[in-house]
Structures are given as structure tokens and as C-alpha cells.
């Protein structure tokens, strides 16, 4: 029988929140980790992407938090800005019954001064990237005397990205008497060394989904000649109907080339690579998350931290050099128990890569037989159902999802609730998805009207 959240000794307020969010059962990593973290133990938690690791540490941290003391009590270190933003978002969601809770993002690319001011006013939880966190620690702008818990989220990626030294310096700078939690999708020996150096009596929890028979991701591969790849991709897109698909390439040059080819064929596609400015990345991700773009093409580095609900299809247009990268890529589909499909295009010369993947996964992707050149690309050219509107106000302007919904529906906006999709509120701006055919009128009504008595600018994100 599945464990319930109620069996994990969580406070009634947190149980109410998980219930409101529709989390029926804790995921295996949550079942194993939550009691240990509540008991104050150091922990190494390992499970695949999408298995609910954020809530696994967020729930016990929120439970132990003293909201009345305006001191920094927990620090979450993440490899990228996007992941920090996601973790902060999830923690705010889970902490919504903690009145007065303050969670601060401390990431690069934003003015240090604003962050320092916020720290001065007092925050309970800081979520940040290694460089900026270290910056604050070294400037003495972050008071850690009451810090009880430090989490290294996606520890393996932080090491992969070369943040090991910074993370170590952070750990040396914070109080020794603390709980240290380390989450990772894989467990290389470098993680073990970090654990030995910075944790005490750490317990290890491993959820071996990868080798589980009923892994929710079905994996396939197509053996192709390099010259047939594009056709094989079209075939895959046609045979695996999807609302959203994520395509990985190994290099940003291939991302650009493929994006161009697909958009020339009329497909709804966007690309994500290291060359984009931060605000462009944010827009691309917001559009993909809210179904304004159906296909996203990314490199591994740029694709880190993509968290999309209902992602049905991941395609490896190019197989990665390392099998662990493959595990990360396909972990983006089939999240939280939903079925997903991963299709890889492999040339004959890449059979060794497939063999290495089989070793890591415990199962081999299944070979698909297909006829090349049979896909009518026009059948794939279909607009996304939604379009994204950028509004010039966010959390700091006290804009809430309900306000935007109110401005777009009823007499004010004239749209039906069902024409409005995901509403994402950021600090100073918001993204809202609107049914494509109503996008222009929605922009007009926001520009003509007011939200919370204030005027904001709205524009279509193309
Ligand atoms: P990970 O850190 O392991 O990659 P996340 O913490 O990002 O995974 O969770 C993936 C998704 O699953 C998120 O959208 C999250 O809200 C959702 N989720 C987390 N726990 C549960 C649960 N117990 N039931 C249903 N969905 C959950
Ligand atoms: Mg995570």
C-alpha cells in the first residue's frame, strides 16, 4: 500500500497544502527522505530528475522553520538561476500557509544591492547559485548565525559545471553545527568525497528508478544514416503525437541549424542555447512551459533546469557522449509518474553509445523500424494553442494570478476562463498564456485597463 503524506509526521498546514496542490501520495524519495530530514539527519538523496526532490527537502525545512524569527534558517544551493527560481517557486507554493514567510533568490545577473537590502530586512530561506551566495558570504551581507540547514540541490551538476570549489568555500563559511542535505540525480565519486568532507554521519537514500522495470519513460531508438536524420525526426514527431516535445542536440550549432530547418517547415519551434541573454531564456522557457511553443530544441547546458509539466516526448537528435547526460535528458519526461516517451536517433557508429546507455539504465532502448521519407511535413505544421503575453508587473507590484485572470475575463477582458492558460508571476513581470486567437484582444484590454488600480504594459512575446 502506498504511503500517505499524513504518515510522514508532517504538520496539518503542510498536509493541507500538498492536498491543495493535488499531490496524492509522496514520491518514493519523499517517503524515504522526509522522516530523516525531520529528524535532523544529514542526508544524501539520489533519485532521477522529476521525482520530487524539491518537496523532499522543502517540506521538512518548512516544518522546522520559525517564521517569527526573521533570521536566515535555510540555504539552498542550486547550479543555475533557473533551478534556483524553480526551487524558490516550489518552496513558496509549499509554504503558502506560513504567514509572513520570506524566501529570497540570490543569483547572478541581478543587482547585489537589492539582494543586500532584502537580506537586511530579514529572510527565512535563501535559494541561490554558488557564485552569488559566496559573494554575499564574503561581503558579510548574509548573516548565517541562525542557519540550521544547507541543501546542495543537483549536487552532481554543480560539480560538473565546475562549482565544486565555490560550494566548498560556502560550506566552510557557514556554521559547523548545521544539517547538510545533498540531492543528486547521479552519484559519482566526487559527490562521495564532498559528503565525507562536509557532512556528518550522512545517511544515503537511493531510489533506483533507472533500473525499475516499470520506469514510466518508454525508450526507443531509430538507427539512421546521418543524412536521414531530419526525415527520421519528422517521422518521430508524427508517430508520437505530443503537445510539447523537447529535442536535444550536442552543440549549439546543431541547435541553430535544426531550429531553422523546422521553422522553415512551419513547425512551432524555439531554441535554447548558451548564446541567449537571460531575459530571452526566461521568455523561451515561459513560452514552452505554457504551451505557446510546441517544440523546444536545446543543448544540455542550456537545457538544464527545464521543468515542464506534461512533457510527453524527448528526442535525442544527437546522442550525448556520456550516458549520464542521457539519463538527465530523458528524466525530463514521464515526470511524477506520468508516462513519457524518449526517442533517440543513432547512427551505426553510435552503437557503443547505446551500449553504454544500456549499462547505466539497466535496459536497452527498443529499436524502432521506420521507412525514411514518408512523412508529410505539412501535417506537422500546426500552431501552438496558446500565445504568451508579457505584462510589465509582477510580485513586487503585488500582482497575483487572480488579478490577471480578473483583468482578462468578465466584463473587463471578455475572455472565458478556459481561454487562459498558465499565469507565471515573476518579481517585476508576468507571463500569461492566452488562447492564440484571443491574444491580440487580450493585449489590448490589459493596455486599456488597470490591474490593482495600476496601469501596466502588455505585449505579445513572439
Ligand atoms: P526533481 O527535483 O526530483 O527533479 P521536482 O522536485 O522538480 O523533481 O518535482 C517534479 C514535479 O513533480 C514538480 O512539478 C512537482 O511539483 C511535482 N511533485 C512533487 N512531489 C509530488 C507528489 N508527491 N505528487 C505529485 N507531484 C509531485
Ligand atoms: Mg530538483
Image (spheres, rainbow, N blue to C red):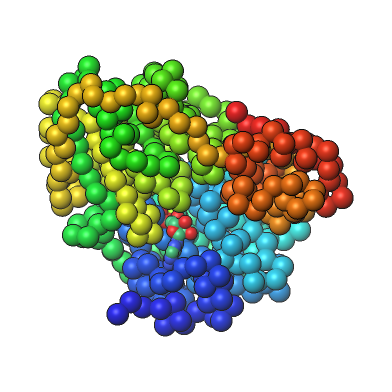
Could you say where residue 451 lies in the image, as x and y percent from the top left? 81, 49
- Residue 348 visible here: yes
Q: In which quarter of the image is residue 345?
A: top left
Closer to us: 372 or 438: 438
Q: In this view, does 90 lie above or below 390?
A: below
Q: Quadrant of residue 367?
A: top left
Q: Residue at x 50, y 24 (%)?
A: 275
Could you say where residue 335 lies in the image, as x and y percent from the top left? 38, 54
Could you say where residue 229 lies in the image, as x and y percent from the top left? 25, 23
Could you say where residue 2 lies in the image, as x and y percent from the top left? 33, 77
Name the image quarter holding the C terminus. Answer: top right
Q: Where in the image, quadrant-wise, is ligand 1 located?
A: bottom left
Q: Residue at x 76, y 58 (%)?
A: 121
Q: Is residue 3 above or below residue 159?
A: below
Q: Quadrant of residue 204?
A: bottom left
Name the image quarter holding the N terminus. Answer: bottom left
Closer to us: 143 or 216: 216
Q: Is residue 258 above or below residue 303?
A: above
Amino acid at each position: 500500500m502506498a504511503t500517505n503524506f499524513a504518515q510522514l509526521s508532517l504538520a496539518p498546514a503542510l498536509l493541507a497544502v500538498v492536498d491543495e496542490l493535488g499531490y496524492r501520495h509522496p514520491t518514493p524519495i519523499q517517503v524515504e527522505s522526509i522522516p530523516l530530514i525531520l529528524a535532523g539527519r544529514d542526508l544524501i538523496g539520489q533519485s532521477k530528475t522529476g521525482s520530487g526532490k524539491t518537496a523532499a527537502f522543502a517540506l521538512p525545512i518548512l516544518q522546522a522553520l520559525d517564521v517569527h524569527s526573521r533570521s536566515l534558517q535555510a540555504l539552498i544551493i542550486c547550479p543555475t538561476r533557473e533551478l534556483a527560481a524553480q526551487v524558490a517557486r516550489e518552496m513558496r507554493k509549499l509554504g503558502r500557509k506560513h504567514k509572513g514567510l520570506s524566501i529570497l533568490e540570490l543569483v547572478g545577473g541581478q543587482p547585489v544591492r537589492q539582494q543586500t537590502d532584502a537580506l537586511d530586512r530579514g529572510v527565512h530561506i535563501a535559494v541561490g547559485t554558488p557564485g552569488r551566495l559566496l559573494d554575499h558570504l564574503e561581503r558579510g551581507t548574509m548573516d548565517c548565525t541562525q542557519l540550521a540547514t544547507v541543501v546542495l540541490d543537483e549536487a552532481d551538476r554543480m560539480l560538473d559545471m565546475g562549482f565544486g570549489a565555490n560550494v566548498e568555500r560556502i560550506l566552510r563559511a557557514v556554521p559547523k553545527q548545521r544539517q547538510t542535505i545533498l540531492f543528486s540525480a547521479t552519484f559519482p565519486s566526487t559527490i562521495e568525497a564532498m559528503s565525507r568532507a562536509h557532512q556528518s554521519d550522512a545517511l544515503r537514500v537511493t531510489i533506483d528508478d533507472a533500473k525499475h522495470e516499470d520506469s514510466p519513460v518508454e525508450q526507443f531508438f531509430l538507427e539512421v544514416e546521418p543524412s536521414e536524420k531530419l526525415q527520421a525526426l519528422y517521422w518521430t514527431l508524427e508517430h508520437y503525437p505530443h503537445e510539447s516535445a523537447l529535442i536535444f542536440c550536442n552543440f549549439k550549432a546543431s541547435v541553430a541549424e535544426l531550429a531553422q530547418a523546422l521553422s522553415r517547415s512551419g513547425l512551432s519551434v524555439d531554441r535554447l542555447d548558451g548564446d541567449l541573454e537571460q531575459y530571452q531564456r526566461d521568455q523561451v522557457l515561459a513560452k514552452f512551459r505554457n504551451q505557446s511553443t510546441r517544440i523546444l530544441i536545446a543543448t544540455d547546458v542550456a537545457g538544464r533546469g527545464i521543468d515542464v509539466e506534461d512533457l510527453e516526448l524527448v528526442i535525442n537528435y544527437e546522442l550525448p557522449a556520456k550516458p549520464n547526460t542521457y539519463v538527465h535528458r530523458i528524466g525530463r519526461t514521464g515526470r511524477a509518474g506520468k508516462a513519457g516517451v524518449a526517442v533517440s536517433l543513432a547512427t551505426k557508429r553510435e552503437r557503443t553509445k547505446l551500449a553504454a546507455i544500456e549499462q547505466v539504465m539497466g535496459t536497452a532502448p527498443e529499436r524502432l523500424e521506420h521507412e525514411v521519407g514518408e512523412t508529410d511535413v505539412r501535417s506537422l505544421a500546426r500552431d501552438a494553442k496558446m500565445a504568451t503575453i508579457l505584462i510589465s508587473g509582477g510580485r513586487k507590484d503585488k500582482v497575483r494570478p487572480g488579478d490577471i485572470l480578473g483583468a482578462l475575463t468578465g466584463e473587463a477582458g471578455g475572455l472565458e476562463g478556459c481561454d487562459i492558460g498558465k499565469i507565471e508571476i515573476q518579481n517585476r513581470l508576468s507571463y500569461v498564456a492566452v488562447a492564440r486567437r484571443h491574444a491580440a484582444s487580450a493585449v489590448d484590454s490589459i493596455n486599456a485597463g488597470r490591474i490593482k488600480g495600476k496601469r501596466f504594459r502588455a505585449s505579445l512575446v513572439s
